[in-house]
Image (cartoon, coloured by chain):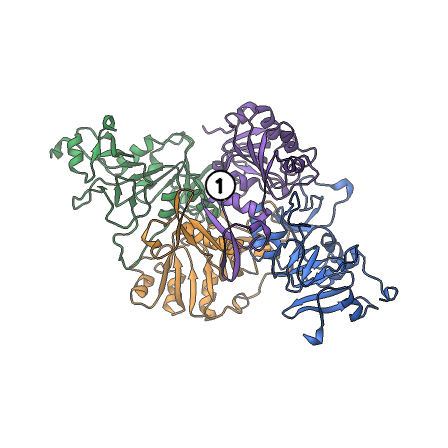
Chain colours: A purple, B orange, C blue, D green
Amino acid sequence: MIDKFVASMADAMAGIEDGSTVLVGGFGDVGAPAALLDGLAAQGARDLTIVIVAGGRDGSKIEHLLELGRIRRMVCSFVRPASLAGRLYQQGALELEIVPQGTLAERIRAAGAGIEAFFTPTAADTILAEGRETRVINGKNCLIEFPLRGDVALIEAWQADRWGNLTYRESARNLNPVMAMGAAMTIAEARHVVALGDIPPEHVHTPGPFVHRVIHVPE
Amino acid sequence: MIDKFVASMADAMAGIEDGSTVLVGGFGDVGAPAALLDGLAAQGARDLTIVIVAGGRDGSKIEHLLELGRIRRMVCSFVRPASLAGRLYQQGALELEIVPQGTLAERIRAAGAGIEAFFTPTAADTILAEGRETRVINGKNCLIEFPLRGDVALIEAWQADRWGNLTYRESARNLNPVMAMGAAMTIAEARHVVALGDIPPEHVHTPGPFVHRVIHVPE
Amino acid sequence: MADSEFQPLDRLGIAARIARDIPEGWFVNLGIGIPTTVSDCVPHDREVIFHAENGVIGIGPAPAPDAVNPYLINAGVQHVTLRTGGAYVHHADSFAIARGGHLDLCVLGAFEVSETGDIANWARAPDEPVKQVGGAMDLAIGAKRLWVAMEHVTKEGASRIVRACSYPLTAKSVVQRVYTNLAVLDVAPCGFVVRDMIPGLTFEALQARSEAALHREAQQ
Amino acid sequence: MADSEFQPLDRLGIAARIARDIPEGWFVNLGIGIPTTVSDCVPHDREVIFHAENGVIGIGPAPAPDAVNPYLINAGVQHVTLRTGGAYVHHADSFAIARGGHLDLCVLGAFEVSETGDIANWARAPDEPVKQVGGAMDLAIGAKRLWVAMEHVTKEGASRIVRACSYPLTAKSVVQRVYTNLAVLDVAPCGFVVRDMIPGLTFEALQARSEAALHREAQQ
């Protein structure tokens, strides 16, 4: 019997190695895997690359990982200069790759879809394109982009069943389904456990095969 | 008040021009826009490029358009040599572009997502790559592919509301939502008309802004 | 300059001016700042579908304080409501909307707009220590129409209507129209064309506040 | 060759042999032909999730004739059922599954497999007048494991286990294992390694039916 539920946070975090690339879902606090990020802090993996829309807001779980010195590199579309992430970067203690938000989502999708590179007009005419390959296609100047693959994705879901089928609530969907596809191991925290078949097959947001472990974290 | 429902097939087909590229949803008969293809035959546009998974099965609506001499070119993953499409191609009366099925879907998605080109390992080491640009990325030989944009998409849906929000039944989803994103004008035939709000926002399969016209075609 | 003879629009006035030009049925993304308030200026019975980058289609007005849904925010991380007929998509699909030409309109704020339609709205200098790009570059290249909402001049009195942007570009040759607190300007092949001015403002007074050359509609 | 001493597997026998090697929990796509019947050979209480390219996840057995759902087919356009726990996705997501490394296993039929793992299964000749590619190239490059199910030799007696494919390739260096009516062969760095043979068949008899050199497990 397939059963992706794990009994403890230690089981959920087992095997996450130093040096891993970790995709972290959510937009602001909405859809963010708060419990899993606490679990990651407790688990102790370091030298991490964190891929997230906006990195290290004051008081956030990412800021806490930064305080613990676990993050070597962040890939994101937004960092406040005055935040801990911004200060660490300016001190040379944190690597930062700033990526347009749509390109960030598309690069994660590319990893999940087996696309090895793509050309997009986004950022092609900007300083973010300096020193990188561009090409005029269909009359548009385009920039090449490569997949952002996660060793691990940490996501938040509303419902989960034992096959790992997931649903999301309202705008808590955001990057979670995309990251679920883009990582070798996807770990979800779900607010509700439902029986197999309770989610109608037309309403599954993330099919079970994209999900490797689920931990029940009630509201 | 936004109302994408049209009253007649003539209204649904209005403005489709000779020379158009038409994306046609469905896989076999499942999810195929049968009524719209009849409408296209009646409307009379010719010199068409048809993009479809499998082209011109005996007795199909596409075969009928071929009989009427409306199709100049087909882009698809599969054509039976003994079908009318296969015979017309061998007589030089039909252009054919054979595309791996996953690449076909991805090229249509690329058109809908603003991706101007992508590299995929699919077909890179095959005769389909002859004379085309390849590149080794991440240790894999990859083939460049370009978007397949539709002037028009003809799709089938289960439910539709006046904003054009759609749902699909079971495996009738197939290429329909992808093609809805990949065309300048998406025309849907829907089995059921529902009130705005009847489809819960988490369960919408194709959001209304991708859909331009809907015609009610009961089961 | 006879500043006393005209009253520049306030930020809500700019938003209201933009809202007048958005017809029913358009699919519209509003950037942070002045643009965000445009939706409040569209009458509810004119159905305009507002999109947020975080995957919300059909954003409605702000919720009552006692009716906040913590799972429903916009791209500015503000609590919002969903109109009847709205839908949710994931981030990659949401940016496919933005980048794939599905938005009838995007309205962004900016530091500067050039006479060739370049927009600079994300970084004050190329060597800014920490960059914050967000989704502006994706929206700027992808929408069918890009309009900019901004003050005509900076607090220091420098024009934001320029021959060439001095700040780092967000995107090149994409802006079609600019709404400022003084005027509505189209970006045409000849450069900026004045479509509308606030009452009491003269073309000459507007030109004096614009670094780029302005054209009258008839000149075009 | 003492053909009388062994009984080659029939097509269902090959499928059953493959089914034995598929553990619970795998996500599996089955190609047309022999592979399609593999799912019938997996006991229902061993949960294996079968995928079809047309966007079906969790395919179950064929329906009873009076319980056919006309909206539910597999990639071979046959009516199927959905297991409890299954889901539907659209074609681009379905091929993201195939191409993005999400399938634990894909089983395809083939004309030929080479000792370097090349597979030829879509065209009989480069100059075939009409080409029928389908989804095989996508599946072949994308699955974590690619196994092939086929007869060991053609009706004309030619081996399908070859040094280099003579038919147009579907994909290069992708096959990991071949199940024929005579044997199970792994594609290893040294070439084909015999993992299993049907009762009564000798290594020499198998080699005689294989154009490529075979290796015993110990030789590897």
Q: How many marks?
A: 1
* Residue C202 drawn above or below residue B119: below
Front-most of residues C78 and A84: A84
Q: Residue furthest bottom?
A: C218
Q: Residue at label 1?
A: D87
Q: Amino acid at mark 1?
A: Ala
Q: Position of residue C121 (x, y in %)?
A: 67, 53
In the rendered image, is residue C60 in sight? Answer: yes
Q: Position of residue C32 (x, y in %)?
A: 70, 50
* Residue C195 drawn above or below residue A137: below
Front-most of residues D143 and A61: A61
Chain letter of disc 1?
D
Front-most of residues B149 and C206: C206
- The image quadrant that residue B58 belongs to is bottom left
Q: Residue furthest left?
A: D1
Quadrant for the C terminus of chain A, please: top right
Secondary structure at numbered mark 1: strand
Q: Position of residue C173 (x, y in %)?
A: 61, 61
Q: Mark 1 Cα within 10 Å, few/some/many (few <14, many 20+)?
A: many
Quadrant for the N terminus of chain A, please: top left
* Residue D192 drawn above or below residue B101: above
Q: Position of residue C94 (x, y in %)?
A: 59, 49
Query: Is B213 placed left or right of C74 in the picture?
Result: left
- The image quadrant that residue C157 belongs to is bottom right
Q: Residue at x 17, y 38 (%)?
A: D209
In the rendered image, is residue D88 in sight? Answer: no
